[in-house]
Image: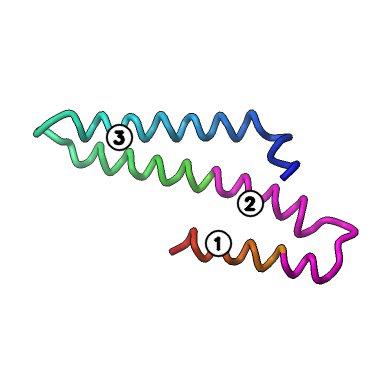
Amino acid sequence: MSHAVHGQKSLLARVRRIRGQTDALERLIEAGQELDCGSVLQQIAAIRGAVAGLMAEVLEGHLREHVAAEGISSEQRHDEIEAVVAVLRTYLK
C-alpha cells in the first residue's frame, strides 16, 4: 500500500480528527441526564462524514495505484476489483 505511505500525514490527521470527534461524542453522552439529542446527532453525522472522507481518500489511492496500474495482468486487475467490491459491500451495509 505504497500510496498510503505517501499520504501518511494526511491519513493520520484524518484519523486523529475522527478520534477527537468520537471523544467529543463520548463526553456529550457522559454529560448526564440533560443530554442534548440534537448535539449528539450532529456529532454522529460529523463522525460519519469524516469516516466517509477517509474511506474515499484511501479508496481513491488504491484504485489509482493498484486497479488502474499499468503493467498488471487482466487477472490481477480482476482480483483487485473483486477485493474493492467486497470491501464496498461491507462498508455500505
Q: Is residue 65 left or right of residue 28?
A: right
Mark 1 / mark 2, whichever is N-terminal: 2
Which residue type does callout 2 highlight?
A: Leu
Q: Looking at the rendered structure, which numbered label has been put on residue 25?
A: 3
Alpha-carbon span between mark 1 and mark 3: 26 Å
Identify the residue at horizontal 25%, vertical 39% (top origin).
40
- Name, please, the residue furthest toward the left: 33
Alpha-carbon span between mark 2 and mark 3: 26 Å
Q: Position of residue 39 (x, y in %)?
A: 25, 36
**40 or 65: which is nearer to us?**
65
Classify 10 Å Cα crowding around label 3: few (below 14), some (14-19), many (20 and above): some
Judging from the image, what secondary structure is the residue with disc 3 in? helix
Q: Which residue is mark 2?
A: 59
Q: Which residue is mark 1?
A: 88
Q: Position of residue 34 (x, y in %)?
A: 10, 32
Mark 1 / mark 3, whichever is N-terminal: 3
Identify the residue at horizontal 22%, vertical 41% (top origin).
38
Q: Is residue 14 left or right of residue 25?
A: right
Q: Is residue 9 above or below residue 4?
A: above
Identify the residue at horizontal 64%, vertical 28% (top origin).
9
Residue 49 placement: quadrant? top left
Q: Is residue 64 left or right of residue 16?
A: right
Identify the residue at horizontal 47%, vertical 62% (top origin).
92
Q: Which residues are magenta?
A: 54-79
- Name, please, the residue furthest toward the right: 71
Alpha-carbon span between mark 1 and mark 2: 9 Å
Tell whether label 2 touches label 1 (CB within 8 Å): yes
Which residue type does callout 3 highlight?
A: Leu
Mark 2 / mark 3, whichever is N-terminal: 3
Which residue type does callout 1 highlight?
A: Leu
